Image: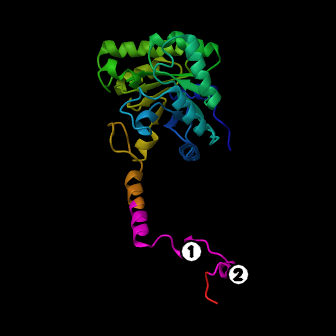
Amino acid sequence: MGTRLTVPAVRARKARAGGEPLVMVTAYDAPGARLADAAGVDMLLVGDSLAMVVLGYPDTLSVTVEDMVHHTAAVARAEPDALIVADLPWLSYHVSPQDTICNAARLIRAGAQAVKLEGGTGRVPMIEALVAAEIPVMGHVGLTPQSVHALGGFRVQGRTAEAAMQLVESAKALEHAGCFAVVLEGVPADVAGLITEAVGVPTVGIGAGPDCDGQVLVYHDLLGLQDDLRPRFVRRYADLGDATVEALGRFAADVRSGRFPSPQESYSLNSTEAAALGLYAS
C-alpha cells in the first residue's frame, strides 16, 4: 500500500493553481476498487449510479441507503489508497439535518471518507450540518440525476447566461458551506470554466469539458461494459463488454463439446485410493 489520499490533499489539488488534475472513477465492489486503485486513480466514487449500472433500475431514484452502505463496505474492503467518496441517495438528505447526519454516518462507518450530495443553495443547511459533524462533503451541481423528473430528463444545464450564473452562485455557496470539492455534471464547457475559476476548491467534471480541476467517469462506461446508455462525453478506453461475451461464448462451446474441463483442469485420486474404490481393474 502507498500513501492514502486524504480530503485535505484533494482540496489542495486545484489544477488552475498548479495542482495535478484529479482522476475519479466509480467503484461498486472490491474487485473494481482494487483494479482502479492499481491504475492510480485519486478517488473512488461509490455512486448512486449503481442503481442503473449494477442493479438494473431505469434511474438513480430507487437505490437506498442500505444499498449504498453495502457497496461502500465492499469497496472499502479493497483497502485502496484512493479516497473513497460515497453518494447520499435520494431522500436521504432532504428531510432534516439530523436524518442527513445519521445517513451520512452510516456511509462513513461502512468505509467512506467523504459523502457526496446533489443540489445548489437549497442544500447549504444540510452541508453545514454535515461539516459541523466533521463529515467531509463533496457537492454536485449542474445535471443532478436525482432531480431527473424536475429537470424533465437527463438534460444539459446552464445553457443560458442566467442559468449559467445561477450555477456559478450555487457552486460558490457550496464552497462557502464547506464542500471540499464540487462535481460539475452536464454543463457547457464554458460554464464549467467560469465555475472552476470562481471557486477555490477543485471541480470535478463529467460532461463538463476540459477546464475542470479533475474528471470522473463511470467505471463500466470507460471500459465498454455496457451499451444501453452511452452519453457523448464518455470516451471508451476498452471494449470489455464484447471481449466478455466472446470469452463466455467460448466457455459455453467448450462445455457443450466436452472440451472443458480437460484432465489438466481436473483432480484425480492416487492409484491406491482409486483401487480401493474399485475404479481400476485388477
- Give the residue displayed 53% in from the left and 26% down from the top: 65
Q: Which mark is residue 272?
A: 2
For the residue pair 247 and 113, the one nearer the viewer reads as 247
Residue neighbourhood size for the residue with mark 2, other residues' Cα within 10 Å, grouped as few (<14), some (14–19), many (≥20): few
Residue 181 position, x and y percent, is 53, 23
Q: Residue furthest right?
A: 272
Residue 116 visible at all = yes
| Residue 21 visible in the shown view | no
Q: Quadrant of the N terminus?
A: top right
In the depicted structure, whether residue 100 falls above or below residue 34:
above
Camera-side residue: 112 or 91? 91
Pinpoint residue 66: horizontal percent, then vertical percent. 54, 29
Q: Earlier in the sequence, mark 1 or mark 2?
A: 1
Q: Which residues are magenta?
A: 249-278
Label count reads: 2
From the top left corner, tell me how far across and down residue 109 is, in percent: 65, 28
Where is residue 25? Give x, y as percent.
Answer: 49, 38
Quadrant containing the C terminus in the rendered view: bottom right
Left or right for 52, reference 98? left
Residue 113 on the magenta span:
no
Q: Residue 17's quadrant in the figure?
A: top right
Q: Is 100 situated above or below 10?
A: above
Q: Could you give the CA–CA distance between mark 1 and mark 2, rounded to whole angstroms?
A: 20 Å
Q: Is residue 272 magenta?
A: yes
- How many C-alpha atoms fall within 10 Å of the one at disc 1: few (<14), some, or many (≥20)? few
Amino acid at dot 2: Thr
Kind of residue sitting beneath label 1? Gln
Residue at screen point 55% across, 76% down: 263
- Residue 264: give its label: 1
Q: Is residue 95 above or below residue 135?
A: above
Determine the secondary structure under disc 1.
Answer: helix
